[in-house]
Image: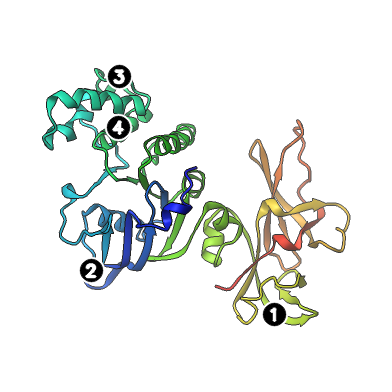
Amino acid sequence: MTDLQGRRAGQPVIAIDTVTKRFGGSVTAVDRVSLEIAPGEFFALLGPSGCGKTTLLRMIAGFESPTDGRILIDGQDMSHVSPNKRPINMVFQSYAVFPHMTVAKNVAYGLKVTGVPQSEIAGRVEEALELVHLGGYGARKPDQLSGGQRQRVALARALVKRPKVLLLDEPLSALDAKLREAMQLELVRLQESVGITFIIVTHDQSEALSMANRIAVMERGSVRQLASPADLYENPANRFVADFIGKVNLFEARVASRDNGSLVLHVQGLGEVRLPQGMGAAEAGRADLALAVRPEKLRLERERPSPERLGFEGQVQQVAYYGETSSVFLTDQAGHSIAVSIQNEGRSTQPMVTVGERVWCSWAPEDTLLLAD
C-alpha cells in the first residue's frame, strides 16, 4: 500500500467541510460531514442503504449541490464548478458503456468530446486498455465481453482522462462473488499503478476492508467512525460500527464495581465479568454499555476453561458448515444466541460439536470490546 503519512501533512486532494444535504426541506441525507482525503489514497465510504454515502459521492462529483458547507478539490471550492470542469471522473454500478461502439471508441469518447487531438487519442486509449489488462480488445463490441471485462472498459474510459480523483459508485455489485473478489484485487493493483486518489462507495464490508487505506463508516447521514480497516474491525468506536463491520456478539452490560484498577461488569447472560486494568476506562461512566466479542476470538472446549479466560457454558443449537469455516451457534443461560467461528483445519466431514451438546465457550480478556453507544 502507498505510504500516506507524509502526504497527509500537506494539502488534501478532497476536503469536505461541514457538508449537509437536505431534500425537500425535511429529509437530511448528509448531516454536517467533515473529512479529508489524501492524494493517492484509496478511500471508502461504507454504510447501509440510505446512509448518505452515494449522496456524498454525488456532491463530490457535482451532480448534487450541498445545502450547507463546501467541498474543495486541490484547495479549490467546487461550489460553482460544474461536473465536467472538475478534475475527477466517475465509474457507475451499471458500467454505462455504449453498446454500439467498439471498446476503443468507448474509451476514446471522453477524449474526443473534450477536444484532445486525434494524434494523441490512439496512444492514450492503448495505454488505458493495457492498464486494465484489455490490450488487444479494442476492436470488440461490449456484447462480446464478460461482465468483468465491461467493467474494465468503464475503468479505462475513466482513467484515460487522467483525473486527480476517480469516484467508484458500487462498481462491483453487478458481478458474481468470485469475479467480484478478483476485481477487488485488480482495483487495488490499478490504484497503486496509476497513483491517483480512488473513492469507492460500497455497502459491502469485505469489499471496503480488502481495498481501502481508510474507511468512513456512515449511518443516517453522519460519519460514525473514520479509521483504517484493521482499526475499524479491532477497535470499533460504537455498537453500530462493531455490528456493521463483520460479525460480533453483543451483550448488554453495566458497571458493577471497580476492584484494584480492574473493571467489574454485570453482563446479561454471562454474570460477572472482570476486565483488566485500563480496559473500558473511557466507557466506565456510561450506563448503556455493551460487551462485545468477535466470533473468531471465541474458543469451544468440553472442559471448564482456565481462570485467566472469560467464558460461560452453553448449549449448541446449530452448526453451519461453510467449507473453510463453520459457525457454531450456542445459547447461554439467559437464552441469548452466541456465534462462534471455527476454522476447519483438518480434513473431516464430521462437525467438531453436535446439536444439543453442552460446551464451554471462552475468550481472552484482551479480545473483549466495551462499547458505549
Q: Which residue is mark 3?
A: 137
Amino acid type of the residue that numbered disc 1 sits on in the rendered structure: Val
Q: Position of residue 63 (x, y in %)?
A: 21, 54
Q: Which residue is mark 2?
A: 67
Q: Quadrant of residue 243?
A: bottom right
**Residue at x 18%, y 50% (from the top left corner):** 83
Give whichever of 356, 5 is nearer the camera: 5
Q: Are marks 3 and 1 in contact (CB under 8 Å)?
A: no
Compute the Cα span from label 2 to label 3.
44 Å
Give whichever of 241, 253 is nearer the camera: 241
Amino acid type of the residue that numbered disc 3 sits on in the rendered structure: Tyr
Compute the Cα span from label 2 to label 4.
33 Å
Q: Is 62 positioned to the left or the right of 166 in the image?
A: left
Q: Is 338 positioned to the left or the right of 190 in the image?
A: right
Q: Is residue 359 above or below residue 100?
A: below
Q: Are marks 2 and 4 in contact (CB under 8 Å)?
A: no
The secondary element bearing badge 4 is classed as helix
Q: Position of residue 92 (x, y in %)?
A: 29, 42
Compute the Cα span from label 1 to label 2.
43 Å
Q: Is residue 64 above or below residue 268?
A: above
Q: Are marks 1 and 4 in contact (CB under 8 Å)?
A: no
The secondary element bearing badge 2 is classed as loop
Q: Is 333 positioned to the left or the right of 123 in the image?
A: right
Q: Is residue 200 above or below residue 304?
A: above
Query: Residue 201 has which mark?
Result: none
Query: Residue 156 has which mark?
Result: 4
Q: Label 3: how many residues lie within 10 Å, few (<14), some (14-19) or many (20+)?
A: some
For marks 2 and 4, the one nearer the N-term is: 2
Closer to the observer: label 1 or label 2?
Answer: 2
Closer to the observer: label 3 or label 1?
Answer: 3
